[in-house]
Image (cartoon, rainbow, N blue to C red):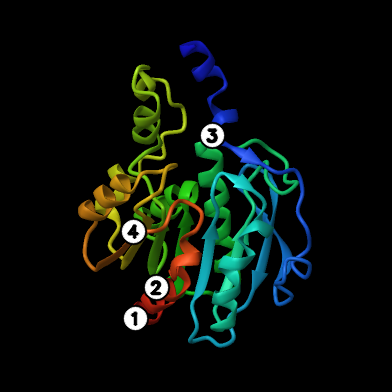
Amino acid sequence: MVAGLYFFQRSVMYHPSSGTQSPERAGLPEMEPVQIKTEDGLSLLAWWSRPKSTEKPVIAFFHGNAGTIAYRNFKVRPLLDKGYGVLLLAYRGYSGNSGSPTEPGLYADARGVMKFLDAKDIPEKRRVLYGESLGTGLAVYLASTGHGGAVILESPYTSIADVAAARFPIFPVRVLVKDQFDSLARLDKVRIPLFVIHGEKDNVVAAKFGKRLFAAANKPKEAAFIPAAGHIDLYQHGAAKLIIRFIEKYL
């Protein structure tokens, strides 16, 4: 069983879908498909919409471990309605992209997003790094390396190893996990405003991980731990308003 966990862990961790619909069919006609180039030679699908003015921020959205970028349409819609720019990336191996997801590979994908925004003349101080579940590791990684003007972490973890150890307590998973995404270890280097939002009833990434991450974060920081929310229903409990309030306050 230990051998199975080790050799098949990435199939347990990543759940990509093979294709995706168009932005129009997803209810996001303002967005256009673009290609994000990575340093290791991949060309990744992303959806892009410019901000309505130079005063508006751009949200770089890093999604969770399952599905396609079209599944995030209800999270992007309120951001577009506020006039924000949005860049919604599909990782390697997701939404029809080539490649296979790994921790180093996803970091390369995230760096490709920053280079795309560089080319669009979006200043760092106007960039919001938004991570959803798995994607919180990418948002923290970028923020710890000097990117972004603010960071939003939806249902974050301290590290994947911590979550795996809680789920499989009888196995030595900490020494087996290949893709650690150790956000807690990077957090001391994050100096931009940070917002954590988490559901108290989350049974995928327990709220205790978000609370531990928030406690370790530098100021300025804010958090919302929603008693009735789980892992995937935060937007049914007012997440959009809380996120927009944070963005408006700091950017």
The amino acid type of the residue labelled 3 equals Met
The amino acid type of the residue labelled 4 equals Pro
- Disc 2 to disc 3: CB gap under 8 Å: no
Q: Earlier in the sequence, mark 1 or mark 3?
A: 3
Q: Which residue is mark 1?
A: 249
**On the picture, is 163 further left or further right than 22?**
left
The amino acid type of the residue labelled 2 equals Leu
Give the structural element (helix, strand or loop) at label 2: helix
3 or 36, which lies in front? Answer: 3
Q: Which residue is mark 4?
A: 227
Q: CA distance from mark 3 to mark 4?
A: 26 Å
**On the picture, is 66 further left or further right than 174?**
right
Give the structural element (helix, strand or loop) at label 3: helix
Q: CA distance from mark 4 to mark 2?
A: 14 Å
Q: CA distance from mark 2 to mark 1?
A: 11 Å
Q: CA distance from mark 1 to mark 3?
A: 35 Å
For image coordinates 66% across by 69% down, the residue present is 48
Q: Earlier in the sequence, mark 3 or mark 4?
A: 3
Residue 206 x, y percent position in the rendering: 36, 44
Residue 187 x, y percent position in the rendering: 29, 51
Q: CA distance from mark 2 to mark 3?
A: 29 Å
Q: Earlier in the sequence, mark 4 or mark 1?
A: 4
Q: Residues within 10 Å of mark 4 (few under 14, many from 20)?
A: few
Mark nearer the viewer, 2 or 1 = 2
Q: Tag on residue 216? A: none
74 or 100, which lies in front? Answer: 74
Q: Residues within 10 Å of mark 3 (few under 14, many from 20)?
A: some
For image coordinates 60% across by 29% down, the residue present is 11
Mark nearer the viewer, 3 or 4 = 4
The amino acid type of the residue labelled 1 equals Lys
